[in-house]
Structure formats: structure tokens, C-alpha cells
């Protein structure tokens, strides 16, 4: 058999495993809470790794190593910011969000939590939140499908459309039938695959480049500044890179995992597992890039046309085709885990936060689960249609989607959990200002205008959201005994756990 066929066999085994998990999860899904939130039954390990896999996407195995391969450790500030943000998210947001969503009418989505938390009788907060999620995630899913299609095109020589159909078909199948449980269980397996791959490739690669000291000497020979965190950076540049960590507080597909864990006391274990996974994965990613620099410097007869393919190319060079196939599957796992997470969150926003609110409040669970599955299919079809013509796919929105969600939802989530006087009008005003700031700041490059260099749009968006939400809340605050009682109940639940 040729190397390509052996690698395809590995990919086929991986795809089959994902479909089996989808079938298993389908058998365990009986109502809307099961489909949208897994019945709040996730253990700490599944919660931790599914949150990590949903977060990182192909960026972890392609984007970041490619950036470090080109620019050196100066690009590692993003990893530092993300690690810090993720830890604070697990420490501050996770336990309080799990407790508060339970006492506040058992909320199963972020928009429903916000409506229940603020007793928003206008329904505006829930509807605006649902629309923001629906629009941004449709384009996000489209971007993931493009990445999966390009992966097949570059790795196996298939057509772009064939890759699109394969990735879209498998992801939609296990997400549509298995719901949140399928997404979380597959994310767990995908997270393990990503971690193992990111540890094995640099570990074997260091031996191929002559050992640790020879590897670092080769990197210095290419460019001594590659091993310096500060060379080639500015203060604004470091702030922009590290500010990626602010985005964690507002990513619906990540923080929904906190709501799904069995109980609050499991958060600490989940945090340890999740942060351990993240730190080892990011260290592995950095070393993939450094080993790649050393390897291609030492072996000038081997060409790397695309820096973002450094992980893929090293895996194919260093491992037997069967194992190289599983390394490729790890890249696919990173892409698919994020697509599936975004599909289920978008489906929940469409059904739970828009259909139930605007169309049929008394719909049965069976009817809503069916609509949830149909929503996954419809959103995937729209996203795939956007991805048909790669050149016309709206990828500009995806470039600041992380900032958009972080600046729109992040401050609102944080303040809702820690400040009892926040109001629905403060949340609405802050959310709108955060989203608009990100879009305007990015499109007009206001950082360049004001500071002479680009400042990541999440920084002004996040800060303005905080200020506006605080001021408007003070202006509109009226004591609500139900809100006060639920705030106290959530704190009591935390203390008891």
C-alpha cells in the first residue's frame, strides 16, 4: 500500500470512531436538556478536554506553530495570554456560572441565563444574544469547513469540494444525532489526540535534529532573535497578543461546558485537568515550531512551502504512514471539535433563545429536540454554502469573531456573576457597545490612527463594554428581591460545595 492509502486508513478509523460516539450519544439523549447541555452530566475530565478542544481548533496545530516558525518566540505572547485567561476563566467564571445557571431557572444556554439572571421581561437581551451567536457562529462554522476542505486537499490531493463534503458530513452526522453529549465526548477524544500528537512530534523531532542543544543551536543559526520573547515586539504588540486571554470570558462554546458539569465541586478537578492539557499542548506547539526551524535548516533538501504546515510535514517525515495518518487525524480533530461545538451552540440559540421566545413558548421537548437537530443541519448547510467558493467565504468576520464574542459577552458574564446591582439595560447597552467597538475598531484600524500601530480590537471593546454596562446599570438599578435571592442562593451553593 502507498503512504497515502495507509494514512487514509488512519483517517477512516478516526472518522468511524466519531460516528460511533454520535450513535452512542443519540441513545442517551431523550429531552432538550440532554440535547443542548448533556443533562448536566459531564465529568471533570470530559468537561476540561472538551472545553480545550472546542477552544483551540486548527490554530493550535497550524496557526501558532506557523507563526513561531516565521517570527520566533515573539509570537508566543498569544499563548501566554491565552493560558492566563483560561486559568482565570476556570477559577472565577466556571464555578459561579455552574451554580448561577442552576438556581436561575435551570438555564441551559448563555442567552437564557442572561434573561433569567436579570429578569428581563422585554426579552430583548435574550433575542439580541441569540442573534449575535447565530450570525457570528454561522461564519465561524463556515471557516472551519473551509479549513477541513483545504486539509484534505493539501494532505491527500482530493478536490476542495470532496474535502468539504467529507468533513461537513461526518461533523453534522454526530452533532445532529448525538447533540451536546456527542460533541463533548468526541471533543474529549479529539483533545487527547491533539495532546499526544503535540508531545510526540517534537519529542521524536529533537532526536532527528541531534538532541536539545543541537536543536537550539540550529535555531540560533537561523536567527538568534527567534529564542527571545521580546525581540521584534513592542509594548502595544505584547498587549495585543496577551489580550487574547480576555476573550475566554465571552466564548459561548467554551463557557457552556462549565454549565454542563455534574456539580460545582468537580470544577476544581476539571480546572487542573484542563490547564494541564492546555499548558502541555501549548509547550508542544512551541517546540513543534522550534524543531521545525532546526530540521529544515539542517535538511536543506527538504522544503516547507507553507509554514503553517510544519506540524503536518514533520509528522509525515518522522513517523510510519499509519502513525502519520493519526497525526493528520489530530489536525482534523482540532478543526472538527470546534465546528461541532459551534454547531450545537448555534442550534441552541436558534431553538431555545429565538424559536421558543418568538414563536412557540409551550413547545414539547420532543418537538424542540427535533428542531434542534434540524437547526444543526440548516446552519451547516448555510455555512457550507458560504464555503463553496473559497475566495468568496466571509473570513473577515472570523478574524475578529473571538474579539467580537469576548468584547460582547465577556464583561457581561463577569459582572453578572460578581455584581448583584447589574441590570438588564446595563447588559444590553454594554453588549451592543462592545460588539460595535470591535467591528468599527477593526474595520478602520483605529489603533494605527491613535497609537501608530495596530491594537487588538478586543482591548477597547472589552473596556468600553465594562464602563457602559456599569454606568447604565447604576442609572437603571431598582432592587429586585428575586434577583437578590438567586444571587444569594448561588453563593450559598458555592459555599456548600
Image (cartoon, helix red, strand yellow):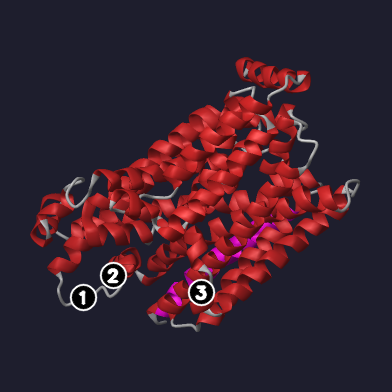
What is the C-alpha distance between the residues marked 1 and 2? 10 Å
Q: Are marks 2 and 3 in contact (CB under 8 Å)?
A: no
What is the C-alpha distance between the residues marked 1 and 3? 25 Å
Classify 254 as above or below 418. below
Is residue 200 shown left or right of residue 163?
A: left
Q: Are marks 1 and 3 in contact (CB under 8 Å)?
A: no
Nearest-to-viewer mark from 2 and 3: 3
Determine which residue is flagged by label 1. Answer: 302
**Residue 80 sits inside the magenta stretch:** no
Q: Measuring from the top left, give residue 155's x and y in whole percent.
A: 41, 75
Q: Main secondary structure of the magenta part?
A: helix
Which numbered disc, 1 or 3, marks the residue that appears first in the sequence?
A: 3
* SS category of the residue bearing label 2: helix
The residue positioned 69% from the left and 48% from the top of the image is: 128
Q: Are marks 1 and 2 in contact (CB under 8 Å)?
A: yes
Determine which residue is flagged by label 3. Answer: 149
Give the magenta part as a residue range. Answer: 4-26
The residue positioned 45% from the left and 79% from the top of the image is: 153
The residue positioned 20% from the left and 62% from the top of the image is: 293
Q: Residues within 10 Å of mark 3 (few under 14, many from 20)?
A: many
* SS category of the residue bearing label 3: helix
The residue positioned 23% from the left and 76% from the top of the image is: 303
* Residue 317, numbered label: 2
* SS category of the residue bearing label 1: loop
Which numbered disc, 2 or 3, marks the residue that appears first in the sequence?
A: 3
Amino acid at each position: 500500500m502507498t503512504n497515502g492509502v495507509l494514512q487514509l486508513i488512519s483517517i477512516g478509523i478516526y472518522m468511524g470512531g466519531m460516528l460511533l460516539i454520535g450513535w452512542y450519544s443519540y441513545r442517551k439523549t431523550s429531552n432538550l436538556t440532554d440535547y443542548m447541555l448533556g443533562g448536566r452530566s459531564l465529568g471533570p475530565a470530559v468537561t476540561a478536554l472538551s472545553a480545550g478542544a472546542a477552544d483551540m481548533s486548527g490554530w493550535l496545530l497550524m496557526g501558532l506553530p506557523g507563526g513561531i516558525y516565521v517570527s520566533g518566540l515573539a509570537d508566543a505572547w498569544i499563548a501566554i495570554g491565552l493560558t492566563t485567561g483560561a486559568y482565570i476563566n476556570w477559577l472565577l467564571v466556571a464555578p459561579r456560572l455552574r451554580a448561577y445557571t442552576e438556581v436561575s431557572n435551570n438555564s441551559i444556554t448563555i442567552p437564557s441565563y442572561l434573561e433569567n439572571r436579570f429578569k428581563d421581561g422585554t426579552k430583548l437581551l435574550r433575542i439580541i444574544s441569540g442573534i449575535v451567536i447565530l450570525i457570528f457562529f454561522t461564519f465561524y462554522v463556515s471557516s472551519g469547513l473551509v479549513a477541513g476542505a483545504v486539509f484534505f486537499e493539501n494532505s491527500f490531493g482530493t478536490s476542495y469540494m470532496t474535502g468539504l463534503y467529507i468533513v461537513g458530513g461526518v461533523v453534522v452526522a454526530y452533532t445532529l444525532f448525538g447533540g451536546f453529549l456527542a460533541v463533548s465526548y468526541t471533543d474529549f477524544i479529539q483533545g487527547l489526540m491533539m495532546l499526544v500528537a503535540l508531545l510526540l512530534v517534537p519529542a521524536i523531532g529533537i532526536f532527528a535534529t541531534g538532541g536539545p542543544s543541537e536543536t537550539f543551536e540550529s535555531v540560533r543559526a537561523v536567527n538568534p532573535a527567534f529564542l527571545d520573547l521580546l525581540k521584534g515586539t513592542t509594548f502595544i504588540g505584547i498587549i495585543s497578543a496577551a489580550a487574547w486571554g480576555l476573550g475566554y470570558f465571552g466564548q459561548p462554546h467554551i463557557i457552556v461546558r462549565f454549565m454542563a458539569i455534574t456539580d460545582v465541586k468537580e470544577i476544581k478537578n476539571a480546572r487542573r485537568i484542563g490547564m494541564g492539557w492546555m499548558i502541555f499542548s501549548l509547550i508542544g506547539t512551541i517546540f513543534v515550531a522550534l524543531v521545525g526551524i532546526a530540521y529544515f535548516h539542517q535538511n536543506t533538501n527538504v522544503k516547507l512551502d507553507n509554514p503553517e504546515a510544519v506540524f503536518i510535514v514533520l509528522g509525515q517525515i518522522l513517523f510510519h504512514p499509519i502513525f502519520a495518518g493519526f497525526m493528520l487525524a489530530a489536525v482534523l480533530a482540532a478543526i472538527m471539535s470546534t465546528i461541532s461545538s459551534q454547531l450545537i451552540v448555534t442550534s441552541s440559540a436558534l431553538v431555545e433563545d429565538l424559536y421558543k421566545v418568538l414563536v412557540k413558548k409551550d413547545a414539547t421537548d420532543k418537538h424542540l429536540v427535533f428542531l434542534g437537530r434540524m437547526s444543526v443541519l440548516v446552519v451547516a448547510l448555510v455555512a457550507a454554502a458560504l464555503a463553496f467558493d473559497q475566495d468568496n467565504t466571509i473570513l473577515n468576520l472570523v478574524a475578529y469573531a473571538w474579539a467580537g464574542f469576548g468584547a460582547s459577552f465577556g464583561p457581561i458574564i463577569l459582572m453578572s456573576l460578581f455584581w448583584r446591582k447589574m441590570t438588564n439595560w446595563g447588559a444590553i447597552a454594554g453588549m451592543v457597545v462592545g460588539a460595535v467597538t470591535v467591528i468599527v475598531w477593526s474595520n478602520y484600524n483605529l489603533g494605527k490612527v491613535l497609537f501608530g500601530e495596530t491594537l487588538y480590537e478586543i482591548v477597547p471593546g472589552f473596556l468600553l463594554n465594562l464602563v457602559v454596562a456599569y454606568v447604565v446599570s447604576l442609572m437603571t438599578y431598582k432592587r429586585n428581591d428575586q434577583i437578590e435571592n438567586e444571587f444569594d442562593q448561588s453563593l450559598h451553593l458555592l459555599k456548600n460545595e
